[in-house]
Image: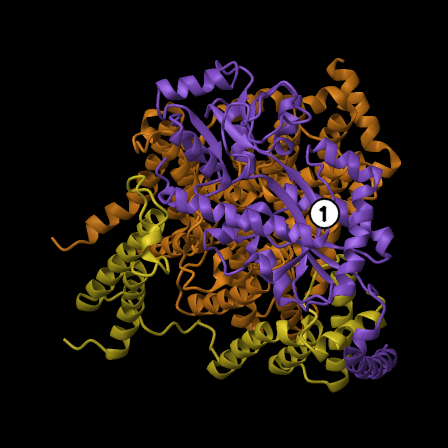
Chain colours: A orange, B purple, C yellow
Amino acid sequence: MDLVSLLTQGIAGTFAPYNFAVMVIGLIVGVVAGALPGISFVNAMAMALPFTYLMPPVAAMTFLGGIYVGGVFGGSISAILINIPGTPASLPSCWDGYPMSRRGESGRALAIAITASAVGGLMSALLLTFGAPPFARIALTFDQPEFFAATILGIVSVVAIAKEDAWRSFLSLFMGLAVATVGIDPLYGVARFSFGVPALESGVNFVVVMIGLFAIGEVLDLICQRQDQSALGRRRDGGRRAGLADLWSVKGSIARGTGIGCMIGVIPGAGATVGAVIAYGVEKQASGQGDRFGTGVDAGLAAPESAKNATTGAAMIPLLTLGIPGSAATAIMLAALLIHGINPGPLLFATDPRLVYTVFVSMIVANLLMIVAGVAVARGFAQLMRIPPAVLGAFIVVLSVIGAFGVRNNIFDIHVCLAFGVAGLVMKRFDFPSAPLVLGVILGPLAERYFLTSLANHDDRVSVFVTRPISATILAMALAFLAWAMWPRMTRLWRRAPA
Amino acid sequence: MAVSSRLVSVVSAKALVGAVCAGLAAGSAMAQEKFPSRPIQVIATFGAGGGADLMARQMSRLAEPILGVALPVSNVAGASGTAGLTRLLTNSPDGYTVATLIALSVSAWASNISTQKPDDFTIVAMTQDSPSMLFVPTNSPHKDIKAFLEHAKANPGKLKVATSGYGTQDDITLIYLEKLGYKTTNVPFARPAERYAAPIGGHVDAIYEEPGDVAQFVKAGQMRALVTFNDERHFAFRDVPSSKELGMQISDLPNFRTLAVPAATPADRVKVLAAAFDKVLDSPEWKKYCEDTYTCTQKLTPEQAKARVKAFYETVQSYQKRFPDMKKGTN
Amino acid sequence: MAVPARRAAAGLLPPLLILAAALWLRGHVAVDPASLRASRGLFGPGFWPMLMLAGVAFCAAGWLAMNVVALLWPSGRATDADPQAPRYDTLRAIVGVGLALAYGAAIPVIGFGFATLLFVVGWMLLGGYRRPLGVAAVALLGVAGVLWFFAGIALMPLDLGKGAFEGATVAVYRLLRIY
């Protein structure tokens, strides 16, 4: 069958009333769940999974795809409006999005975020539709050393987040990396830092840490501030709207973010959060206005926004072409398919092309409709800001606890989350950077696993990382990035040093 | 507005107080109530999309009409499945919580992960069972198991086999082969998805896995089977030799999956659950599912199932005594 | 020269504590240190955690050194009081933290529903929202809504509580038509 007839089938499948309806419902559910602090799109997809039993497989996929696309964006609404990332992937959107809101430009920030997310997601969906098989073949040639190198690139992007004090940022990063080693190790099955407590053997999940530090920490911080003038979202949107010129001026950032997102998306385990953080780091260097990042720069918001949504389509490439889910979200999609007795993989393109192309087309359409859903939910969310901060704060904590629990339905995770909430309060109070810690908890398990499996597969030769061309290139990029970002600091230090 | 919200608050406050009183009374009267009268929580002890998760979801879906209540599945992943089993044991042993208990978790106990043991549980259903097999990518130069083993003998440690980790059944099998003179290198991939991608991408020479988990790759012509580690040949791979035919004694490490409740659960409730799951195992939908995943097994009574689990636990322990250096990842 | 003791403590204590913690943890990676020894060369289960702890120790030492330098040779730029910093109410902070931690501890014992109800009421009172009927209405309706959605629709296995609380939670769930 040629591509045109396949696409026609896909379009017909997407706009079949039932499929289309569940996709729109999924989008709205996703954006709302994403925007609620604590509830991430992975939570929402896991909760939605039982409902897909009742649907035909195609509808199950468009439904979950809608939640995925909407949820990855939705987190940015709360990130921009109240400085609490609704999902981990929206963490970098706080850094330049919230300062814009503080200036009274929340409408403008949301417009940039929605546009960038939609463009990133759309490009990624197009890549999925037209480039999936070749892209999957390239992805298969990547082995563990390459994944390790890419993870190092992500870790190095911390220097971009670091404001002045690189020591503390790297300390925070290493603390996160150390926290991530708690629990049973991935290869040997040995419990580490468990102190004999069985609950600690399950380890510390990064979503739980993120919710604790940024949602609960923020609410705790708020309640101990005496004057309430900086209360959650109490500022009026004073006005500057985003014009087309504004959006056009960040096209370079969106393009860079999209490219990074598509690459990161196919790496197993990395996902939207890593893509967004790396894109922020790269953008800080590449945009030429890095010193103003963190004060509400358009480019600093657009790049991570486009990157995180650009991971959505890309992450589905290995799922659909190889039957290999790279992330928690795609694993849930895999479960939905397997429940219906459908095995994704190369065979699926031959046995059920209608399903495959309906998923492709519905991902494209979902990214376009996301603009509408995003605007609508953002409006409603802004209304929520009128609720007294004490009431809002209480329910943010409740939702955070539910979200932390929902990651693994583990009661211990609630305690970990609340403990990190207290840690977040302390860190904020002492002006200790917390974002690198989250990044460490996210990337630590990946780095360790890739590192050890690489060595097991290559006779314990550490040189494997520099003798394989692709991994060597990525590591060189990481090194160059580090030097590039540290250079101004080094020179400043040099000049300041007593002669 | 104010009036109505006031009204609602008064009404709901009264209702809540009433409900609490009723509940406290009901708590003591629980023993007499009909079982099951509320949803039964099913804990999948591994993440979504895996074998244990799918088994739990299929079983609960098919058991709902039989038991007449919902059986929501929740994933409690972590610590080789023991985190979810801990959750099972800390919930009330009233039959309203059921968890998946699979061979991997039992071998984790034998490796001193968690303090759980077979006697903590009652097995309400032995749902799936499958031997493990060795697969190679389709374009592998090794035609059959003989060629593979000969290559391993001539080039000790050169062949790389993707497994789920050190100290697992996978590792035991590879060490067993090593003791026979066929030394390969164990390359642990903690994530199943990465493990399956490794042979397809040509990064390892073979993969040790149960057939159901890689069925899609076999059907798609990306992998082929070399050997079944069992006494008999696999019903779906008639032309693939069994390990016993090759003179190996490594048939005692099957991958079984069960549904379990805490050992303290009342016997009459165990009976209700076991009868319901038995019915599911007889249903045509389940038969199709287990055939598709190559995991059909004989039905067992709770006592027989418990004996199986115990025997497996002891087998793994005895292998660990036999291969004391296993945990250290020597091979 | 006189270095104010408070500033010295604030600059030196956090990195020192982190450094000490990292060094102490090096001996406590596993309950049984023997389980960390891999004969597969260096790369056993303890390799990566040790490396990360070394990173923590190194960065903490670097931070400490920076702070020592800053204390001994003040650049003059550093000012202690930031007039724009929001004023913190330490008592409220302690009560807030206590309330949050108590909430977490209470969930497995009295069940998610009752713990949440108590927490929401407590938090609103702490945060200055004290109209009795408003508090009651928001708490009851809010918690009922949360339960109805997450336990009823999303089927999350939220804790029911132990003993009598389990029966009470089940009764509330029946009332809300969750069960």
Q: Where does residue A455 sit, x and y in percent of width and height? A: 36, 34
Q: Quadrant of the N terminus of chain A?
A: top right
Q: Is residue C75 visible?
A: no
* Circle 1: element type: loop
* Left or right, residue C21 beside residue B48: left
B1 vs B303, left or right, is: right
| Residue situated in front as seen by the camera: A342 or B262 | B262
* Residue closest to the far bottom: C132
Residue B155 position in % (x across, y down):
35, 20
Relative side of A214 to A373, left or right: left
Residue count near mark 1 (Cα–Cα under 10 Å), binned few <14, some 14–19, many ≥20: some
Count of marks overlaid on the render: 1
Above or below, A350 against A497 in this view is: above
- When the figure is inspected, residue B54 is found, relative to residue B140, above or below; the finding is below
Residue C72, position in %: x, y? 17, 67
Question: Which residue is more in the foreground, C166 or A267?
Answer: C166
The residue at 52%/31% (across/down) is: B208
Amino acid carrying label 1: it is Leu
* Residue at image coords 44%, 39%: A282
Q: Is residue A236 visible?
A: yes
Chain letter for mark 1, please.
Answer: B
Q: Which residue is mark 1?
A: B300
State which quadrant residue B41 falls in: bottom right
In this orientation, which residue lies closer to the viewer: B14 or A365?
A: B14
B321 lies left or right of A78? left
